[in-house]
Amino acid sequence: MNIELDPGDHEEPTWEVYRPGTPRRRFDRRARTILTAAAIAAVLANAGAAWAYWRFTGSDEAKPEVQPAAAGTPFELVLNGTTEPNRPGATGNLTVTVTNQHPVPIRITAVRAGAGPAVADDTHRDAGCSAPPVELNRQAFPVSWEVPKNTIGAFVVPDAVSFGTGGPAACRGATFSLPMRAQAVRP
């Protein structure tokens, strides 16, 4: 049995013949031009996105919360304090948490009440402790706390908070958060 094929069925392609020993070109000129243009467009798009981010958020040097004042110049911080006076008429310690996001160490020189009321923990607030009678015993407390750069420090102010009488029963035994402000300097 003999099978004959039409010459059009078994022709070899003449447009791309690989000959061993000859170097192959990976991309022709047109492909290299398109890939180069795509790479340049990607670089420009990323640079534009970075510029837009910097433009709308500002640089770190321009933000006072990132770059504190010059050494010795006072500036303010917003902090959070927690306390646990557990019964009416009791006094308790105030634990103040300081987050130093500055690239330099800071020293806290005084703490005082911030804007807003004291807030009970979630469990007691859900039980009806909406306006806890918790207040600071003084307007300001002089302190000297060193906080290294990019760290969080927790400090205790003894007997700084009072739990007033006549508050809701749901507030007994609660942990309270108080907004605080601090006066700080860069050493």
Image (cartoon, rainbow, N blue to C red):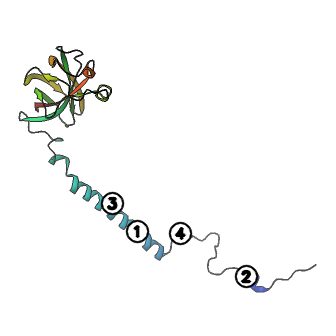
Residue type marked 1 = Ala
Please name the residue that numbered disc 1 is placed on.
38
Above-or-below relation of 5 to 59:
below
Distance in Å between CA atoms under marks 4 and 2: 25 Å
Q: Quadrant of the C terminus?
A: top left
Decide if residue 154 is in sight here. Answer: yes
Q: In which quarter of the image is the N terminus?
A: bottom right
Q: Position of residue 169 (x, y in %)?
A: 25, 20
18 with respect to 10 (left or right): left
Tell me which label, 1 or 3, sits earlier in the chain: 1
- For numbered disc 1, what is the local secondary structure? helix
Tell me which label, 2 or 3, sits earlier in the chain: 2
102 with respect to 2 (left or right): left
Q: Which residue is drawn at 30% across and 25% down?
A: 124
Distance in Å between CA atoms under marks 4 and 1: 17 Å
Q: Where is residue 141 in the image (x, y as percent from the top left)?
A: 9, 22
Please name the residue that numbered disc 4 is placed on.
26
User: Comparing marks 2 and 3, which lies closer to the viewer?
Assistant: 3
Please name the residue that numbered disc 2 is placed on.
11
Tell me which label, 4 or 1, sits earlier in the chain: 4
7 with respect to 107 (left or right): right
Above-or-below relation of 40 to 66:
below
Distance in Å between CA atoms under marks 1 and 3: 12 Å
Contact? badges 4 and 2 (CB < 8 Å): no
Distance in Å between CA atoms under marks 4 and 3: 28 Å
Q: Residue 46 carries which label?
A: 3
- For numbered disc 4, what is the local secondary structure? loop
Tell me which label, 4 or 3, sits earlier in the chain: 4
- For numbered disc 3, what is the local secondary structure? helix
Q: Which residue is drawn at 62% across and 69% down?
A: 21
Above-or-below relation of 65 to 46:
above
